[in-house]
Image (cartoon, rainbow, N blue to C red):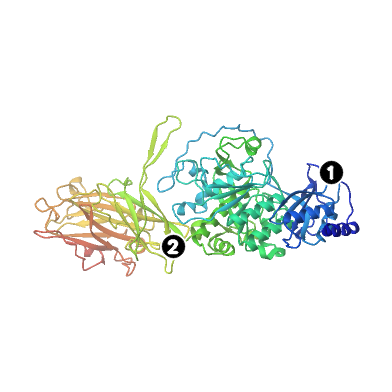
Amino acid sequence: MKKRFFYGVLLTILMVTLGFGTSPTLAAASAGQPAALGDDAGGAYVPGQLVVGLAPSVSLGSIATQAAALAQALGVKVLKSDEQGIALLDVGGHRDLQALAMTAKRIKGVRYAEPNYIYKDAPVSHPGTAPAGPVGTQVRSVAPMPAPYPNDPFLSLDAGWKFVGADIVWANTTASKTVCVLDTGVDYTHKDLAGNVTKGPDYVNNDADPMDDNGRGTAVAGIIAALCDNKEGIAGVSNGKVLAVKVIDSAGIGTAYDISLGMRYCADHADIIDVSWTGVDTLTLADAVNYSVVTKDRLVVAAAGDGSASLTPDNAYPAYYAHNVSYAAFNYGVASVAASGYGDADGPIDYHCPSENTNFGTWVDFVAPGFHIYTTTPWDKIFWLNLNDGNHPRYDYLNYSQTPLAAAFVAAAAARTWGYMHTSTAAEIISRLRTTGYTLNTEGPNCWDKSMSAARLVNLARAMDRGAVTLQVDDATLQEGVQGATISVYDTSTLKLAGSGVITPISTIDPLTGQVVLQFVDTVDILNLSTAGTPAPVYFARVSAPNYTASPQNAFVGPPGPFKPDGSFYVEPGAFQTGGAAVLPHKTANFTVIAENIGGGGYLDDPDLDVWLPSTNKYALGTGYNNVSYGDDTIAPYGSLNEFPFARWIYGYQYYATIVILNRASDTAAPYYPGTYVVGLKNFPGVQNLLDQNSVSAFVWKDGLIKARVDKPLTPTCGSTNIWWFPLQINSTASGAATYPTPAVACGTPANSPYYP
């Protein structure tokens, strides 16, 4: 009673009472104190409501007791209070909130007092868009992504998933941190989210059911944590869970009081807080961010706002805390995110350049895809974006909430990165995403303003020290992919399996005829390869295929740089290494000679493979030695043999050539003729010697095994005169298996070839 009497005496001197009353409409704050102080943020607020931050105190009692005492002293009512130290007071619709706030702040135990400001999605609605109906879904004919990607059928529609590098690491089992989606709630019954959503409180309706009646929260949750590889919909970037906390209502509006409570709840139960809404700087919001970032070391990932390129976004908080000098303690715990996606939804979209509506500036940390993103929407329910923006239930593109979707990609990337670097702080995760992100194009037309030079495009695979390789396997005679070929990649230092994949046709259904259409491919992506370490790991690959190999074979050749002459390779963090190829002959007792010349591109890479049969027969076989019986005796003065039973030139293509030599009937381990078969490759005379600059290798296959492999070293070079390279010989003795001696001359001229005049 003494405390209440003291407050009453104090307020008699300090307070002016203007009456009571309430109003559901929004009011605009008058100009006043600097926005950074939070006393007057210059934004809309709920009339008649005052938010008060109370300091825990043994002498003053519980928060509820303090709130009640304060309300009685001020002559107002307590609407809500929470043991987190926040009270919402009903002061009536006709009282001067700013004056009352100043009075309240002079009372012991009051940390701050201010109007209950409004935060919202931007824009809230888009008139003129036809509603889609409550349960209608779009009928789509979509080609699913091939193996080794997830089997989620609509994943190929979500270009953002691949753009941020989630494709490279999707199968990585390192557990992600939990992301709290502080938004409009989440449809936790959605078939692509059920099991990955933890239900938090609903501060809008004051219950424990954070069901989404707007749609944006579910869209954000799908980007972060849609179930992966479940034959349904899309896949999330993170492999963890989302905590759904509802602080924004169906129309995309929330109050500072609800947001403060929700953010504190998130900070107590999750490591990352995803924020899609924006608003003004207030003490209530700053206090909640301070609790999350400074007290709990949480990471707040905030949308920069869809304000169409605002360089001074006073209404873009909490994102604008990221580099605000007035809140230096927040700078390393708040990450602001702008949206990319330049182009039209009906055409190609460039995710390197900005979307039409995104805010930007020196205060922005990261950029991620935000335009034309296909994601989850509430499952067969009516929701605000369905009725007002025409978004379909279950799944759809959300083209109006751009920076919120971009922020979701960054929050998910942070969740996985923090799981990988589990002992890091929030500041270290921001630093990691920054140092591994890509710089922006601030020079070209229609791309980023120069103020964005410090921002980075997020790449999850780089942040997790992961890369990938695309390897190709072709039939030696058909120039087609070997379906069912299994490629296994190993670490050269440990010989441990690092990844594998199978070349599999892509199956699609023609929406008009219903027929199954197969697209035969010749490549496979090997994902999630570690790039960590000094030096970085080096890999090699083996291939096996039914009817081709007897066991896995080291048969790959690749372009110089990432690939070494022996076919081993390294991968770049966050990127796909490409160009590695293996050419397989069918498993046969015959001897198959294959030459590969990879690196430059074009017909000049043709290795121009030739094989000279034992000199007693004086037969040469290759693209430059034609059969005399065909009437071309000028090119083949020594004779040639293009048909069995001796040997046959089978194929010559852009980067490889194939020659088959018949085995001896009496001893299948040896070629048909006794003596020495000489293998040679040449480059076209009069041009740059590509044999010196590309990766060049020669193989001899037999019975599904590589009997000999010779890789041309990069040094010494053959030069522009010695355009022939003689990698190996096949020695066929009178009896016994063939041997493969190295010739005395590796580089030479035509004079070094057998039986030269």
Residue type highlighted by circle 1: Gly
Give the residue pinned by disc 1: 21
**CA distance separating discs 1 and 2:** 65 Å
Q: Position of residue 236 (x, y in %)?
A: 51, 48
Q: Residue at image x 89%, y 51%?
A: 17
Q: Position of residue 529 (x, y in %)?
A: 41, 58
Label 1 crowding class (10 Å Cα cut-off): few <14, some 14-19, many 20+?
few
Disc 2 element: loop
Say if residue 638 shows up in the picture.
yes
Residue nearer the viewer, 235 or 192: 192
Residue nearer the viewer, 273 or 509: 273
Q: In which quadrant of the rendered view does residue 441 lie? A: bottom right
- Is residue 610 shown left or right of residue 313? left
Disc 1 element: loop
Q: Position of residue 189 (x, y in %)?
A: 55, 40
Q: Residue at image x 20%, y 46%?
A: 631
Say if residue 309 shows up in the picture.
no
On-image quarter of the C terminus: bottom left
Instruction: Return the residue found at the far right.
Output: 13
Instruction: Return the residue found at the far top.
Output: 513
Question: Which is nearer the N-term, disc 1 or disc 2?
Answer: 1
Above-or-below relation of 223 to 713: above
Residue type highlighted by circle 2: Thr
Q: In which quadrant of the rendered view does residue 528 lie? A: bottom left
Q: In which quadrant of the rendered view does residue 554 lie? A: bottom left
In this rendering, the label closer to the viewer, 1 or 2: 1
Q: Position of residue 620 (x, y in %)?
A: 19, 55
On-image quarter of the N terminus: bottom right
- Is residue 87 shown left or right of residue 479? right
Q: Which mark is residue 522?
A: none
Give the residue pinned by disc 2: 531
